[in-house]
Amino acid sequence: MNRSDGEKPTPTRRGFLAATAGFLTAAGASIGATTEPTTSTGQVNTPTRSDPGATEPFWGEHQAGIITPIQSHTYFAAFNLTATDRNQVIDLFKKWTAAAARMTAGQTAEPLADDPDATDVDSAETMELGASRLTITFGLGAGLFIKDGQDRYGLAKQRLEALVDLPRFNGDQLIEGLTGGDLSIEACANDPQVAFHAVRQLARLSYGIAELHWAQTGFAATFAPGQTPRNLMGFKDGTNNPSVDDPEAMNQFVWAGNESPAWMRGGSYLVVRRIRMALEHWDRMKLSFQEQTVGRHKYSGAPLGGSKEFDPLKLDTVDADGNSIIPDNAHVRLAAAATNDGARILRRPYSYNTGANFIAERWPPWKQAMEYDAGLLFVSYQRDPRTGFIKIFDQMSKLDQMNQFVTHTGGGLFACPRGIASGEYLAERLFETA
């Protein structure tokens, strides 16, 4: 994966930026820090700006893109494997590892070719854009281990107990073409083209071994200094995240531990959901109704009954009439750790907008109309989805007042292995033990 002594130096995006620094300037000051891995609030969902050449580490104990402060754009993609034997999969993971290490360092996915007839090299459309804090996070779906009852790669016995099939929740309207996958890649960067380029190159390297199943772009909705991003409903999203600055909290809620095999320890389980929002109807609701639905004040982000965003939820407080300050079916109440036996997950929320759809409305007068195909790309990490997302969302899918405005249309569950050490490749220990 490293350049040999006899190999010619190759152009890099970062090198180009250095050469043209006379007319390139930084994109702006960071939110809380420039290239620091965490923010002063410990909130992974606080976006940060940085110069185009800023990089995030690729090698390490954990995969980047999990507790990394959120970047402004994401490109998520799920793949289905077409490989006929495990050696092809291993070869793909080696190629992906090498390319990801290069791209997150601001380089092209592969060394550029001198041969004008070469076709299997980087597409080069981002050479001048810098790394833009690119992170690439890989996930393994259940289909890698066993699919349609077949142990395609001799990995069936290695399937993790926590890598379950997600249950069908109340209200799910999952589209097959937007659900599942054998492998996942999430590329996040402060430039949308850099994020897309990363997935595009990894997809190119997978030709004949895997094929794209579904993909979704996303964007963070704010860059206000030190603030939590807002989703398209206008509310702050991810306020109750456990602090990424708290190692104990990360070990308890995010990182897989000794219950997992060595290749998974220090990894995490990704649950991604594509959630369409009925913004046309939400926008007609009174502010007071919106706040009762969410359980927070819209503008300050404070919980109902509080004045500041990070005030504790007053779940036991009632008003003069004996009604709960935070309604029983409010979104924040049903998502709170206190109502889920202490369960918590780490959110990295992105919004999406892919245009408009023609639908038959589900609200009176039930006419046919156009709606935005926009909403939330829900991305969450947890130590175990059975005690994380599944536990939390089971009651939310049944009781959450917000359900009248949102529809889950796709997603999946993936095991994101431990971080990759220099000289290793993605999930190497999995194949060594299988």
Image (cartoon, helix red, strand yellow):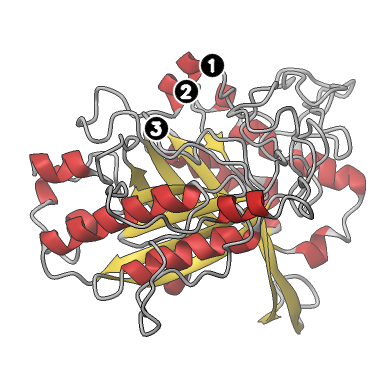
What residue is rendered at 43% in x and 44% in y? Answer: 270
Asked where in the image residue 408 lies, by quadrant, the reply is bottom right
- For marks 2 and 3, the one nearer the N-term is 3
Q: Position of residue 69 (x, y in %)?
A: 61, 35
What residue is rendered at 39% in x and 28% in y? Answer: 255
Tag 3's secondary structure? loop
Tag 1's secondary structure? loop
Q: Position of residue 210 (x, y in %)?
A: 29, 69
Q: Nearer the viewer, residue 292 or 217?
A: 217
Query: Callout 3: few (<14), some (14-19), or many (20+) C-alpha neighbours within 10 Å?
Result: many
Q: Amino acid at mark 3?
A: His
In screen coordinates, is 309 left or right of 253?
Answer: right
Q: Position of residue 137 (x, y in %)?
A: 43, 47
In screen coordinates, is 20 left or right of 380?
Answer: right
Q: From this view, report whether residue 132 is shown above or below residue 352.
A: above
Residue 333 visible in the snapshot:
yes
Q: Which residue is mark 1?
A: 246
Q: Nearer the viewer, residue 417 or 269?
A: 417
Q: Amino acid at mark 2?
A: Met
In screen coordinates, is 380 left or right of 355?
Answer: left
**CB atoms of marks 2 and 1 within 8 Å:** yes
Q: Which residue is mark 3?
A: 62
Query: Callout 2: few (<14), some (14-19), or many (20+) C-alpha neighbours within 10 Å?
Result: many
Residue 329 visible in the snapshot:
no
Q: Whole-Å distance between the Cαs marked 2 and 3?
A: 11 Å
Quarter of the figure that contains the C terminus: top left
Q: Whole-Å distance between the Cαs marked 2 and 1?
A: 6 Å
Q: Nearer the viewer, residue 111 or 193?
A: 111
The disc at residue 250 is: 2
What residue is rendered at 61% in x and 53% in y? Answer: 130
Q: Amino acid at mark 1?
A: Asp
